[in-house]
């Protein structure tokens, strides 16, 4: 329908388009950025360090445990049947 004019049309509406290889062809999502859910942390960033003096080595390892939740599903809409 829009062909090469699709990007211009979306830009005029302030809509950004992203591609994602794991979506089924012909499927799209329209999402209100920052409104669908939230991200919290079960554990915040935790650095660990240790030494191995015999090898003159110092090790550093860090990790965090994020938790994501959708608490406003009405802010995302799935579009299907878009493939030809």
Image: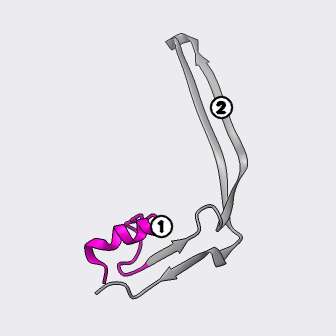
Please tell me whether mark 2 sits on a helix, a strand or a loop.
Answer: strand
Q: Position of residue 53 (x, y in %)?
A: 57, 11
Residue at point 64%, 68% (across, down): 36
Depth check: give the residue in front, 82 or 14. 14
Give the percent coordinates (x, y) of residue 39. 68, 56
Q: Is residue 62 above or below residue 2?
A: above
Q: Report which quarter residue 45 is drawn in.
A: top right
Image quadrant holding the N terminus, namely: bottom left
**Quadrant hosting residue 32:** bottom right
Q: Helix, strand, or loop for circle 1?
A: loop
**Foreground of the two, 26 or 2:** 2
In the picture of the structure, the residue carrying the numbered disc 1 is: 15
In the image, what residue occupies the spot 26% across and 72% down? 4
Q: Nearer the viewer, residue 37 or 7?
A: 7
Q: Is residue 58 left or right of residue 65?
A: left
Place of residue 80 in the rendered image (x, y in percent of width and height, measured from the top left): 44, 85
């Amino acid at each position: 329908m829009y062909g090469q004019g699709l990007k211009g049309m979306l830009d005029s509406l302030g809509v950004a388009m992203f591609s994602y290889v794991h979506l089924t062809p012909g499927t799209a999502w329209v999402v209100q950025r920052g409104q669908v859910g939230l991200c919290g942390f079960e554990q915040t960033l935790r650095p660990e360090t240790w030494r191995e003096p015999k090898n003159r080595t110092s090790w550093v390892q860090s990790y965090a445990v994020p938790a994501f939740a959708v608490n406003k599903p009405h802010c995302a809409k799935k579009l299907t049947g878009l493939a030809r």
